[in-house]
Image (cartoon, rainbow, N blue to C red):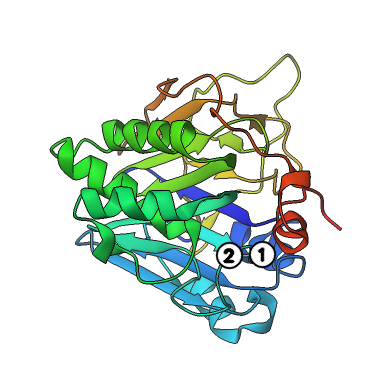
Amino acid sequence: MCRLFGMHAGRRSVHATFWLLTAPDSLEVQSRREPDGTGIGTFTADGVPRVDKQPIAAWEDRAFAREARDLVSSTFLAHVRYASIGEHTWANTHPFEQDGRLFAHNGAFTEVAALDRRLEELGAAGLVRGQTDSERMFALITAETRRADGDVAAGIAAAVTWIAQNVPVLSLNFILTTSTDLWAVRYPDTHELHVLDDRTGAPAPGRHLRARSPRISAHGEDIGDFVLVATEPMANDLRWHLMDPGVLLHVDRNLTLTRTNPFPDGPTRRLTLDDLDPVAAASQREGKT
């Protein structure tokens, strides 16, 4: 199953080396189970998106290790791919960039031809450069965001609702970032998505659960507050919590967290693994083996 990682450090530019390379379940470790591509998306100090990706596993890619150590950003988006649709090419590797935003997806839906027709209706077919369902979903989010005068949350709500109502859906989990904001969706409850809230003063999930995660180092200095979103907990920290299904999580540049539920209760036509072909089903199975 594909793995997602998103981090927001507020108004500061930081490194994410621990989570990408050295955490017990880092992206590099996860890539040994997901062999079809790895990418990291960041933003420059001027807010320009930068994507470094290759259609090979991170542990095989020396550039991944170099970039993971050197990249500095206020928001990070990383993805390790287990392909279900599309060849192992650069164009099909996550994250994707559109309108200055970055996007990565974990899940699957079918009948992509219907979505292609919808993108044609909206004049957004040209946004799609590869073969994946993921990039098509991002194109619909981009088109709906344009129609909503740049309101990303409204664009996400409209796009996910359209997909849920018009094509068979297994999972639409994704993370979307800009240089100042992060959005994450878990929909429906097929796959997990976890959050680690490391903001100062954030409530602990329960009594006596104050074990701290290893702090991310920026040239040896403690970076302070951050919020992580990932497919699975990446280190032994009891503050990781599972997102509720149907939630749109927004983290702004002040690290304010907002949770809304703008989607239908469930897809009109919900898929199970038994509905997928063997290759696609294998790419969507959970677990660490």
Direction from residue 149 to residue 185 in the image, left or right: right
Residue 180: percent from left, percent from top = 28, 46
Specify the farthest residue to the left: 149
Crowding at dot 1, Cα within 10 Å, few <14 / some 14-19 / many 20+, comes out as many
Residue 206: percent from left, percent from top = 71, 16
Direction from residue 192 to residue 219 in the image, left or right: left
Q: Is residue 174 above or below residue 1?
A: above
Determine the secondary structure under disc 2: loop
User: Could you say which quadrant of the image residue 232 lies in?
Assistant: top right
Specify the farthest residue to the right: 289
Q: Residue at x 72, y 33 (%)?
A: 211
> Which residue, given by chain and number where applicable, does mark 1 sit on?
82
Crowding at dot 2, Cα within 10 Å, few <14 / some 14-19 / many 20+, comes out as some
Residue type at numbered disc 1? Tyr
Residue 32: percent from left, percent from top = 76, 70
> Which residue, given by chain and number where applicable, does mark 2 sit on?
85
Q: Is residue 139 visible?
A: no
Q: Residue at x 41, y 49 (%)?
A: 114
Q: Is residue 269 visible?
A: yes
Residue 224: percent from left, percent from top = 47, 42
Direction from residue 259 to residue 265 in the image, left or right: right
Q: Residue at x 32, y 52 (%)?
A: 117
Q: How many marks?
A: 2
- Front residue of 196/98: it is 98
Q: Is residue 218 above or below residue 199?
A: below
- Front residue of 274/21: it is 274
